[in-house]
Image (spheres, rainbow, N blue to C red):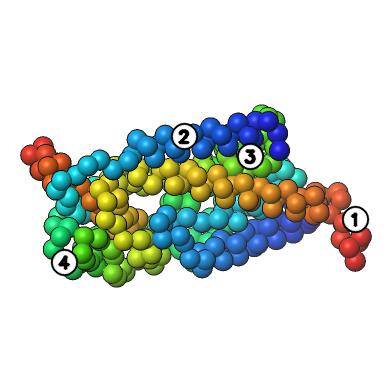
Amino acid sequence: MKVKRICILGILTAVSMIFAYVESLIPVLPAIPGVKLGLANLCVLLCLYQRKAADAFLVLILRIVLTAFTFGSLFSMLYAMAGGFCSFCVMLLARRLGVFSLIGVSILGGVTHNMAQLAVACVLLQPKACLVYLPHLLIFGAVCGFLIGILTKEISARISLQDKSAGKNIRRQG
Amino acid sequence: MKKADFWLIGILLLCAVAAKWLLLPQKNADPVVAVYVNKEKAASFSLYEDTEAVIEGKNGLSLTLAVQEGSVCVKHADCPDKVCMQTAPIHKTNESILCLPAQIVITIASAEESEYDSIAR
């Protein structure tokens, strides 16, 4: 593994861990419990667009495992894994398809994340009571995905995470 | 943004509206508060009698449920995330409060429906 790759993936994992923690501190909307912004997805999206898909997957899995051990529990890891894994697969597919822009891919990721977690809840709990939240989760996944998509687009235009140009970028800023 | 993005947003909105419409609460003459632990019915309460009860959930977690003037909320929970406590009080049929770590579901159902449940079992 190249040193630059280790550095970039390490920074992205650390930043997404902080995002995941900050998110858990922001109070949720009372009407829709447990909804999060999905800031951590920003790092995965950045990686997916500027580096290899394998790197994005690595950042995602590391973030989920590390946040579960530091702030959460094995139980929260189950939901995070389901959401993270499904949304990653869909985002990767959407990116490869090429019909969607970055914002579209982000929306798909957000919605898939919520739907996967709802599916897990339906399996573990009484399905009817969980399905009541489907419309809210659908809308919020789309809205949050849209916002994260805009953020990622703006950041992606300013910061390069590629192995080649990363050094040049830092020099220019210094 | 590309054309497909707008289509995606439109389709998602349509799905959400359709789902909301399908899940709209029906008229319910006799609502009861039903509590499920791990998919199985654990207890039921009248919606119109003020009560407080401790529900034992899975993983050694429990929560305190309170019924007050026709609405239900969770007063206290052992779980680390406290999502169930932050959920707004529920009062309409089909509304529910979920506690994921303890696998507890609190929902408002009609009394008839829950009777069918017990006959089926």
Disc 4: host chain? B
Quarter of the view holding residue B25: top left
Q: Which mark is residue B50?
A: 4
Q: Are marks 3 and 2 on the same chain?
A: no
Instruction: Check whether the beta carbons of the residues at disc 3 and disc 4 lie within 8 A of each other.
Output: no
Image x and y of residue B23, in percent: 33, 39
Q: Amino acid at mark 4?
A: Asp
Q: CA distance from mark 4 to mark 2?
A: 38 Å
Image x and y of residue B43, in percent: 15, 56
| Of A31 and A9, the residue lying toward us | A31
- Badge count: 4
Q: CA distance from mark 2 to mark 1?
A: 46 Å
Image x and y of residue A121, in percent: 36, 47
Secondary structure under badge 4?
loop
Q: Are marks 4 and 2 on the same chain?
A: yes
Quarter of the view holding residue B49: bottom left
Q: CA distance from mark 3 to mark 4?
A: 48 Å
Disc 3: host chain? A
Which residue is located at x 86 percent, y 49 percent?
A: A164
Q: Considering only order in the chain, which callout, 1 or 3, is on the residue closer to the N terminus? A: 3
Q: CA distance from mark 3 to mark 2?
A: 18 Å
Image x and y of residue B101, in percent: 34, 58
Secondary structure under badge 2?
helix
Q: Which mark is residue A105?
A: 3
Q: Which residue is mark 2?
A: B15
Q: Determine crowd level at label 2: few under 14, some 14-19, many 20+ residues with C-alpha closer than 10 A.
A: some
Is B31 displayed left or right of A47 in the figure?
left
